Image (cartoon, rainbow, N blue to C red):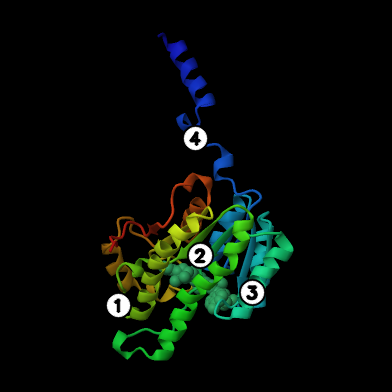
Amino acid sequence: MNCRLMLRSAFRGLRTNPAAGPRSMSQSSLAGKVAIVTASTDGIGLAAAQALGQRGARVVVSSRRQANVDKAVALLQSRSIQVTGTTCNVGKGEDREKLVQTTLDRCGGIDILVSNAAVNPFFGNIMDSTEDVWDKILAINVKSAFLMTKLVVPHMEKRGGGNVIFVSSVAGYQPMQGLGPYSVSKTALLGLTRALAPDLAQSNIRVNCVAPGVIKTRFSATLWQNEDIMDEFKKQLSIKRVGEPEEIGGAIAFLCSEEASFITGETITVSGGMGCRL
Ligand code: NAP
């Protein structure tokens, strides 16, 4: 075959065989989808809302404070994202129900849940942690993730399927010093992902998880603002820097897209190459 014929046949292949070239926009597009992202007025949640919105999803942002919700909605609108918002403290049952009902009222359905909220009220030796600390951490970081899922699943089923994403942490694989109870709560999300995936696959709902490394947000400021701690961290990293929230948002959007249609029960670590598997 001469050179011109070879080129012509290669271009024909690109036109007719989607696997031969870059995937078409429609496979990564989330147009027509409705996404709830909890704790999404700052940091990773806000970046996830932006990444989903940039792919065409209508996003519902939420957090505890109305002023933060208003600010996040304005910011995302300024970036041409279809967005609405409401307050929701994920630890409160009535707030979780309000978030779901508001989404149904304003957007007509639910296709995606990103359960991102977490707290860490304790730093120190795990043996000094109290029952109150454990109650708070498990209620917000684990129980609310399950209870939000339970609330949205019937609505996803009405749409013929959906995606649930939990935000865990590399601390879920390797407990971080001083963050024992928080780390255990993040390990629980790895288990929750695996426990839910087989059941919800029957309803065409995929359940996945992301485990971020150290990401530049307010939540982790005590880590990345401390040079000594970061020097120690960097020894464990292949990419020797702190991650950006958008780098987690992109992974979340990928997991919700058709490009990830055969992925469920999985946790993707987005950590700059930190060695952290059970
Ligand atoms: P962040 O930048 O500090 O943002 C926290 C967000 O959560 C804010 O929008 C806050 O808004 C909201 N929030 C706090 N408590 C809430 C509650 N009870 N109910 C609803 N919203 C609440 O935090 P982030 O670093 O993005 O953390 C997000 C997730 O990533 C968490 O699950 C965290 O464990 C995980 N993660 C973070 C890192 C990291 O290095 N940053 C690493 C691994 C995992 P209001 O104050 O208005 O409520």
For residue 97, which numbered disc appears in the image? 3
Tags 2 and 1 touching, CB below 8 Å:
no
The span from disc 2 to disc 1 (Cα, nearest Å) is: 22 Å
Provide the secondary structure element on which disc 3 rests. helix
**In the foreground, 211 or 215:** 211
The span from disc 3 to disc 1 (Cα, nearest Å) is: 36 Å
Mark sitting earlier along the chain (3/1): 3
Q: Quadrant of residue 128?
A: bottom left
Closer mark to the observer between disc 3 and disc 4: 3
- What residue sits 47% from the left and 54% below the top? 251
Question: Which quarter of the rendering shows the C terminus?
Answer: bottom left
How packed mark 2 is, by other alpha carbons closer than 10 Å (few <14, some 14-19, many 20 or more), is: many
- Residue at the extreme top: 2
Mark sitting earlier along the chain (3/4): 4
How packed mark 4 is, by other alpha carbons closer than 10 Å (few <14, some 14-19, many 20 or more), is: few
Q: Amino acid at mark 1?
A: Gln
The residue that label 2 is drawn on is: 44
Residue 264, position in %: x, y?
A: 44, 54
Q: Amino acid at mark 2?
A: Ile
* Residue 87 visible at all: no
* Residue 154 visible at all: yes
The residue that label 1 is drawn on is: 177
The span from disc 2 to disc 3 (Cα, nearest Å) is: 23 Å
How packed mark 3 is, by other alpha carbons closer than 10 Å (few <14, some 14-19, many 20 or more), is: some
Tags 3 and 4 touching, CB below 8 Å:
no
Provide the secondary structure element on which disc 2 rests. helix
Residue 210, position in %: x, y?
A: 43, 60
